Amino acid sequence: MGLKITDVRVIYTAPQGVNLLTVRVDTNEAGLYGLGCATFTQRHHAVITAIEEYVKPYLIGRDPLRIEDNWQAMMGSSYWRNGPVLNNALSGADMALWDILGKVAGLPVYQLLGGKCREAAAAYTHVSGETTQEVLEMVEKTCEEGYQHVRVQVGVYGGKTMRLRSPDNAPDGAYYDPKAYMRETLAMIEKVRERFGPELEICHDVHERLAPADAAAFAKEVE
């Protein structure tokens, strides 16, 4: 009969409030299954539906080792291709199939993709605080743990938690001042650099909250 896919399941979990999706692909060989990440934190329910209603029915009964064939068919059969929902659904299934292939071959997947090209890679961790002082304290703890690359953030991404005055007579809601966000973030980055010197690699993520002109000005000021 050969190796066949018998089930596709979505594992939905939310550690620390972050929505994560894992795809599990089971086969007719006892104990042989694959896992892949399909996380799309902003629209996770849409990804779950795409997997359960479209990816799963297609894959059941298929050969899990025909990875390229399965991917092309799932992508092409959607007709309107791409987009974050479909891409995340397919990536989770695709990773799970590669996981199965690695187990069948008895090799880590990176060996199947050509092997190592380096012995190690730099890792960064994320540090945030409600104030610049909190950020500095967290960066110090992170450096003590051995990190040499740190992503820093005062408040939530893009100044979401900044206390700003809303426009006069405006309806209730969250209001955002990109210039205030830029000023506060630049001041925070300057303090981090002053305290920890030039050796620490500093990262920051604006998470799409700046218009192109502001992003260019912000990058120049960071420089």
Image: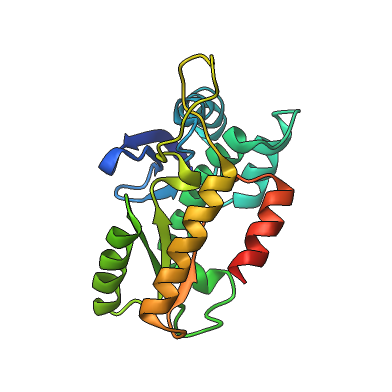
Residue 20 sits in which quadrant? top left
Residue 60 visible in image: yes
Q: Position of residue 17 (x, y in %)?
A: 30, 38
Q: Residue furthest front?
A: 168
The residue at the point 50 percent across, 32 percent down is: 60
Residue 221: x, y in percent?
A: 62, 65
Position of residue 34 relative to residue 90, above or below, is: below
16 and 67: which is toward the camera: 16
What residue is drawn where x is 44% and y is 54%?
A: 100
Q: Is residue 82 left or right of residue 21?
A: right
Q: Residue at x 32, y 49 (%)?
A: 130
Determine if residue 206 is in view. no
Closer to us: 173 or 203: 173
Decide: is 173 above or below 62.
above
Residue sitting at x 51%, y 61%: 186
In-image side of 22 versus 73 (left or right)? left
> Which sits in the foreground, 52 or 174?
174
Residue 171: percent from left, percent from top: 51, 14
Q: Where the C terminus falls, by quadrant? A: bottom right
